[in-house]
Image (cartoon, rainbow, N blue to C red):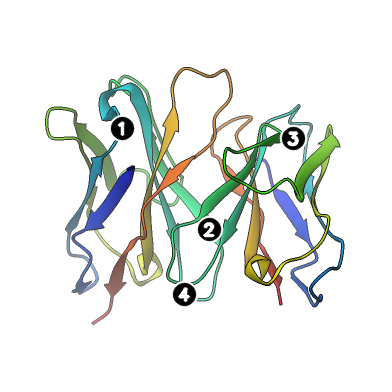
Amino acid sequence: QVQLVESGGSVVQPGTSLRLSCAASGFKFSSRGMHWVRQAPGKGLEWVATMSFDGGKIHYADSVKGRFTISRDNSRNTLYLQMNALRPDDTAIYFCASSPEDTSTLFFDYWGQGTLVTISS
Amino acid sequence: DIQMTQSPSSLSASVGDRVTITCRASQPISVYVNWYQHKPGKAPKLLIYTLSNLESGVPSRFSGGGSGTDFTLTISSLQPEDFATYYCQQTYRTPLTFGGGTNLE
């Protein structure tokens, strides 16, 4: 049974840092692309970052570039998102998602239920 | 960046209705459009990938179509469990972008 379980969400002050984790099980984590997507309160889905199966390709949304870092530990089946210099507009539910690498097109077929990050003074 | 303009933003419908949601890309994106369903407190769910491919386990009442810049998600006969928010997504190039969502109520 495929599972993606996010953790690490919290209430923190602006300017501080937070690290999110996404524990994967039920599939071959090391063979799949991984992604972070967020949803601000009352808003739609926003793509945040992507990492290829081996970490060789990484992309970020402009809104987080230079502040957030995506990484993965294939030996622990875990995806991470290091978030620095947090701002109030980073407040959102953060979802991790996965995509197959053996296709010519990109889509997110596995998703977690999300972890809530609140940036407030 | 490629903008995905989704319409309508909300839609009132009844069980049994045929519903169509539209997404317009700001430039041609070939077949690189996906559709997701999202319910509050739940994980988003992939419905349609690469324009018109039905994800495994998704009922056949869901279908995707379109070409170039204009794309549609159609639910042929609305069921009670279909009331949710729907998003299109382009994966033609980064930054990956989602439509603004359609709240089906």
> Residue B52 — which label?
3
Mark 3 or mark 1, whichever is nearer to me: 1
Give the label on residue A27, or none.
1
Frontmost of labels 3 and 4 is 3
- Tell me if mark 4 has few (under 14), some (14-19) or many (20+) residues whose alpha carbon lies within 10 angstroms of its own: few
Residue at which label 4 appears: A41
- Look at mark 2 in the image and give the residue it sits on: A45
Q: Position of residue B77 (x, y in %)?
A: 82, 61
Task: Determine the residue positioned at 53% across, 52% down.
Answer: B45
Residue at the image position 31 percent from the left and 19 percent from the top: A56
Residue A74 appears at what percent x and percent y? 18, 28
Q: At x 69% / y 47%, what residue is drawn?
A: B3
Q: Are marks 2 and 4 on the same chain?
A: yes
Few, some or many residues within 10 Å of mark 3 (<14, 14–19, 20+): many
The CA span between labels 2 and 4 is: 10 Å
The chain holding disc 4 is A
Image side of residue A106 versus residue A120, left or right: right
The amino acid at mark 1 is Phe
Which sits earlier in the primary sequence, circle 1 or circle 2? 1
Which residue is the extreme one toward the left?
A75
